[in-house]
Image (cartoon, rainbow, N blue to C red):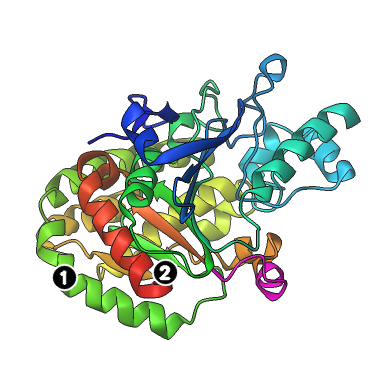
Amino acid sequence: MKLVYEDEYGAYSGVRPEFLKNFKLKEKNPNFEVYDSKDNNNRFIAVKSSRLPDDQDLTEGKYGIDFHRAKPEPKEALQYKNELPQALEIRKWLNDIAFAAATSEEYDRKASVWDNFYSFIWDLMPQTVWVTPHSGSVARAPDEILPYPKSEMDAFTAGVAASSAFNNRNKALKRSMISIHSHNWVGAVLDLGGFGIIDEQKLDAFAKKMEMKYHERAQTIADEFKHDFFDRSIKWLDFIKNKRGTLNPQDLNHTSKTYRSIVENIVKGLRLYGQEIKEYTSEEFKVAIKSLNKMEMQVISSNYLFPAKHVGKILGVSEKIEHGMLHSALQIECLKVYLAKEPELIANIILDVKNELFG
């Protein structure tokens, strides 16, 4: 049962009538929507705007805001705007602040949206907050910096988050945030990130437990994922090699931290399956990626690809916990193919994760 509307790329555009049988609207604007369950135990927050700072429609009030980043100071936002689009390639600002702004008035409008968004997350009321900060559509045209802009969107996350919220029947005794994301790199089906606040040994133990429960079920579309990963990764690697002449992360660090990050994610994912990249040649990558065909997919990893420690720091998650505005938080990164093809499986695993960690 689909509870939200998502386009062919997996971008969220709204909830379906079925969802409203259990949920009521709290906030609706061009950038995000908020719904609370009628028993107030669950909150669903889905973003509709793009995460990219130069992908926006100012006349419609739909801004390029990365809601999983910190609100900048006015000076930072103005400088960010002046350095676009090159700032996207070198990842300056991109990993730290939420938006760019051309004027002080534009800054104030975007800062108000960011503040409003987090007013629905930080609170004293016990509640499970299901949030998809990057589920909005990306309309930015492809260029030499971002040749595949649709890949910047966390596809099909809103549908799985809505399903998890809809089917979560446990009464919330504390306030917890579960932030759901997606990616196209090889790794476990789900990667749990503790924001630097959840005990890593606890996450590791839980991951092993869920591995035993869901391992066989996760293999059903493993081959489809591997073929998709091969096509996407080789396309990216060929693009980077043609543009920068190298696939070595150390060399790329001097010219493009975005491309360095892409290569590092591929390398790290391959390492999870015992494949080490040493020479960083195109042929070596192809051999390593093809070797995945002989292996079964891992279901859950913890704090491996995306531990979210940096995000936890810049959002001040620990400080919010100290002030009673949150009890705990978890980031869940999911493989996009699984979100699109096996949303029920992913929602079931996520509910198990939530119940084990937060009750």
Residue 24 screen position, x and y as percent: 48, 37
Give the label on residue 281, or none: none
Q: Amino acid at mark 1?
A: Lys
Q: Is residue 75 magenta?
A: no
Whether residue 219 is visible here, answered yes or no, is: yes
Residue 65 vs 172, above or below: the answer is above
Which one is closest to the eye, mark 2 or mark 1? 1
Whether residue 103 is visible here, answered yes or no, is: no
Between 263 and 2, the residue placed more toward the observer is 2
Q: Left or right of 152: which side holds 274? A: left
Q: Is residue 325 magenta?
A: yes
Residue 78 screen position, x and y as percent: 85, 36
Mark 2 / mark 1, whichever is N-terminal: 1
User: Residue tagged by mark 1?
Assistant: 213
Q: Left or right of 184: which side holds 65? A: right
Quadrant of the drawing holding the C terminus: bottom left
Residue range in magenta is 318-328
Q: Quadrant of residue 358?
A: bottom left
Residue 250 vs 155, above or below: the answer is below
For the view shown, which residue lies furthest in the front direction?
39
Residue 314 screen position, x and y as percent: 70, 61
> Residue at left 62%, top 48%?
120
Give the label on residue 304, or none: 2
> Residue at left 29%, top 44%?
339
Q: Amino acid at mark 2?
A: Tyr
Under circle 1, the secondary element is: helix
